[in-house]
Every structure is written in C-alpha cells, then in structure tokens.
Image (tube, grey):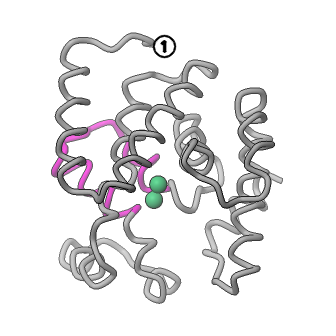
Amino acid sequence: MKSNLGKEELEKLKEIDEELRKNLKESRYRHTVSVAHTAACLAMVYNAPLYDTMLAGLLHDCAKHLSDEELLKHCRKKNISINSVEEKNPALLHARYGAYLAENKYKVKDKDVLSAIEFHTTGRPGMTLLEKIIYIADFMEPYRNQAPNLSEIRKLAFKDLNEALKLTLKSVIEYLDSNKMPVDEITQKTYDYYR
Ligand code: FE
Ligand code: FE
C-alpha cells in the first residue's frame, strides 16, 4: 500500500480542494474536508491507499450543490439510470452524478474511487475497503452530531470496520424509518448482507 502522497498527488488534491471551496456552500465544504481527513485516518489503520482515500473523500459530495431538478436533468441528459426511490427523492442522485463528475470533470480514473463516491449514500453488498471507509467517514466525521450512537461508531470504526459498518447501516435505516422516509432497496440489501 502506498502511504505517502507524491508531489503530483498533492497538487491534484489541492486543485480539487480549491474547486470544491468555490462550488460548495461553506458548511458542505467543511464536511467534505472533514470526510477526507476522517477517511485518511481510517486508511492509516486499515492500509488503504492514502491518495485514493483522500480523493474519494474530497469528491464524495461534489454534486451536492445541485438542486433536485438539476440532478434529474443532468442524469437524464447523460443517460445515468434513475430508480423509483431516486425519482421520489432526487437528492440521492448526488452520489451517482458525483461519480460521473469525478470521472469527467475531475478526471479521476480509478474505478474504486469512483464507486466509493457512487455508493457513499447507500452502500452495497460486497463493498470494497475504500467504499466502507468513505461510507463510514461520511457518517462519523467530527461535524456530524445527529445520530444517537455516533460515539460508539467512532470508536468501533478504528477497531473493527465491518462491525462499524453494520452499526452505521442500522442507524441509517432506523433514522429513515423513524422519519417515515423510504429506505432505498440497496441500503436494505447492504444491511441484510452485513448483519
Ligand atoms: Fe453525500
Ligand atoms: Fe457527505
């Protein structure tokens, strides 16, 4: 595993960081950087490549500034699939469209980085290490403060990533249920797969 950032990699991360600072509102930008750093800490524990992790962390919400209408419009235009839950809740599409932007606007080629962005809101059965790290980092970064079992997940994440993933998925589903929000089929499948 490559644990140091090369000069070009540092430059690329800086470039993306500056672009995101321009595009995202302040609180979203803060969350973004926070996810990248939290994910980097997890990468250090679990031997994930640092650059890929930082890249995925920085870009995971790169389409989050778009409105529901814009996300639907862009996805239709680019022939990106939209399922029935996304049709009802287009904000979910920021993940898939974010992966599209990462590839086409930010020129990311690594498939694992792109899928970590694509699946950061739902997870999926059989997640890669990087996908798990981004999913969990998004949930537990220091500025998050809503979920009831955050401190448990934060501690667990550094000891047992799969247990932390299970608990995170459970929290997400409980949160959606208690707010009478539809649970994406893939989120449910992911939870069933890991529990
Ligand atoms: Fe997101
Ligand atoms: Fe996020």
Q: Residue at x 25, y 40 (%)?
A: 108
Q: Is residue 86 above or below residue 48?
A: below
Classify the position of ligand 1 by quadrant: top left, top right, bottom left or bottom right: bottom left
Q: Quadrant of residue 24?
A: bottom left
Q: Is residue 160 above or below residue 101?
A: above
How many marks the image carries: the answer is 1
Q: Quadrant of residue 152?
A: top right
For numbered disc 1, what is the local secondary structure?
loop
Residue 181 is one of the magenta-drawn residues: no
Q: Residue at x 52, y 36 (%)?
A: 130
Q: Is residue 105 above or below residue 45?
A: below
**Mark 1 vs ligand 2: CB under 8 Å?**
no
The residue most toward the right is 195
Q: Which residues are magenta?
A: 95-119
Q: Residue 48 in the image: state x and y as whole percent.
A: 52, 24
Would you say the magenta stretch is mainly helix, strand or loop? helix
* Type of amino acid at the residue the image marks with label 1: Met
Q: Residue 107 in the image: state x and y as whole percent.
A: 18, 42
Q: Callout 1: 10 Å neighbours few (<14), some, many (20+)?
A: few
Q: Residue at x 43, y 56 (%)?
A: 118
Residue 99 is one of the magenta-drawn residues: yes
Report the front residue among 73 and 111: 73
Q: Residue 167 in the image: state x and y as whole percent.
A: 78, 51
Task: Identify residue for label 1.
Answer: 1
Say left or right for 4 vs 167: left
Q: Residue at x 29, y 59 (%)?
A: 25
Q: Residue 106 in the image: state x and y as whole percent.
A: 19, 44
